[in-house]
Amino acid sequence: MAKSYGMIEDVDKDLGDLSKDTEGIETETSVNAEGIANEFNTIKQMGKLCVGRKGNHFPVLLKNNFVANQREVGLRENIINIMADVETLDPGLFIRRFREQDNRIVPNVLLLPNCGEFGICWQPFEKHNRATSRARLAIPIFPKNLNTAVVAALADLRWQVAKERAQHRWMEEGITGRYYMWFSETKQRGDVKDSFIQDYILWITRESEGIQKQDRIVRGIFWRMMPFPNDIKVKLKNRGFVYNELYKKDQNIAMSDGY
């Protein structure tokens, strides 16, 4: 006990010395009120984008929308698992090429305290660091369907990265160019990026299981420019004539490579 009291006295003495040293030092800090307000407005805007075009406002814990199943809530572990599952089907999802070198860069994910239908890609990378900076995704904690919300955010990431890579030629080059040409030639309505996101969701959730839901040309574009791993392709080639033909074309291209 005497030893403990001695330690307390030493601590008290040190505290007194520190108090004397800090006398006269101003502790007030300036707060950038405008910056804080902008951050709140940014979060609000993200939430509206996740809700959709209508942007309806309603209580987050409304009985008809709130789910009690933890697996359907946008928790960190759930989102990480879904992102990992998508990456197994789209191995190039997080690959960014810079100076002839491929880097795997996993995005930062912001969990929004609201309901919503889709996740979004707020920023594919920083303007002054395209090589190694991480993308920023925003996903609602209480989505209508968590798997769809996460896949939508990753589809948005895919589109924006490809578009930024092609720059002013995005309507002609890369996957954005091929998809835009199909979108224009078939006279599709709406926004081309929204259409791509919906097709990517089908690609990951349906086509990967051999359920044919996409347009034939779109399926061919995705098959060649965002290919499934070879083991998935081998499984799909026995699921129907369409996949078998795509697999045969891959084999012919591999055999004629270099000629």
Image (spheres, helix red, strand yellow):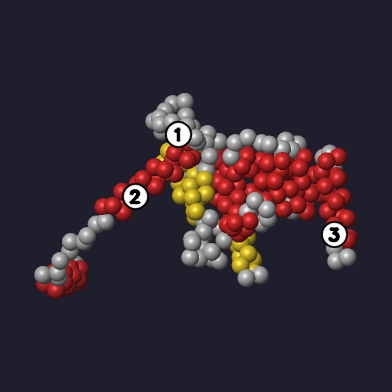
Closer to the camera in the image, 57 or 174: 174
Horizontal arrangement in the rendering, residue 200 relative to residue 43 (left or right):
right
Residue type at the position of mark 2: Asn
In the rendered image, residue 81, in percent from the top left (x then y), is placed at: 58, 48
Q: Residue at x 59, y 40 (%)?
A: 191
Q: Residue at x 14, y 74 (%)?
A: 21
Q: Identify the element where label 2 is drawn.
A: helix
Q: Identify the element where label 3 is drawn.
A: helix
Residue type at the position of mark 3: Ala
Q: Nearer the viewer, mark 2 or mark 3?
A: 2
Q: Earlier in the sequence, mark 1 or mark 3?
A: 1
The residues bearing labels 2 and 1 have C-alpha atoms spaced at a distance of 19 Å
Q: Which residue in the structure is indicated by mark 2?
A: 38
Q: Which residue in the structure is indicated by mark 3?
A: 254
In the rendered image, residue 46, in percent from the top left (x then y), is placed at: 44, 44
In the rendered image, residue 4, in percent from the top left (x then y), is placed at: 20, 68
Height in image: 169 above or below 140?
A: below
